[in-house]
Image (spheres, helix red, strand yellow):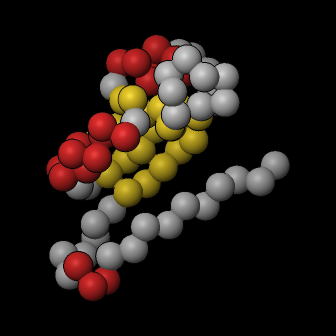
């Protein structure tokens, strides 16, 4: 399992969202060029609990049965 902190959007934008994703996919890292991740994201999160938790799992090796789902919380 891997824990991937990330920022969706420009790092300095006030509307960018930070998140922390747990994944079992080693191949997730090639897609990291779309988001800022690692220490940059951790620094932005700091001790705040204001981040989007995420789970990414390949779970099944058959490419015809892979799905990506996002469930945004509506408060």
Identify the residue at image location x=81%, y=49%: 75
Q: Position of residue 10 (x, y in %)?
A: 51, 27
Report the side of 26 relative to 14 (left or right). left
Q: Is residue 61 above or below residue 38?
A: below
Q: Position of residue 62 (x, y in %)?
A: 20, 81
Q: Position of residue 31 (x, y in %)?
A: 28, 47
Report the side of 39 relative to 17 (left or right). left
Residue 13 seen from this side:
yes
Q: Nearer the viewer, residue 15 or 46?
A: 15
Q: Is residue 70 above or below residue 3?
A: below
Of all residues shown, which one is farthest toward the bottom?
A: 64
Q: Is residue 49 above or below residue 47?
A: below
Q: Position of residue 43 (x, y in %)?
A: 46, 14
Identify the residue at image location x=32%, y=51%: 23
Of all residues shown, which one is farthest toward the right?
A: 75
Number of disc labels? 0
Identify the residue at image location x=39%, y=74%: 67
Res 58 → quadrant: bottom left
Residue 1 seen from this side:
no
Identify the residue at image location x=28%, y=70%: 59
Report the side of 54 relative to 63 (left or right). right
């Amino acid at each position: 399992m891997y824990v991937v902190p990330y920022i969706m959007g420009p790092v300095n934008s006030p509307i960018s969202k930070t998140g922390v994703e747990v994944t079992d996919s080693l191949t997730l890292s090639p897609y990291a060029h779309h988001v800022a991740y690692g220490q940059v994201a951790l620094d932005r999160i700091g001790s705040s609990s204001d981040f989007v938790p995420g789970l990414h799992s390949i779970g099944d090796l058959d490419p015809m049965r892979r799905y990506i789902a996002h469930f945004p919380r509506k408060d």
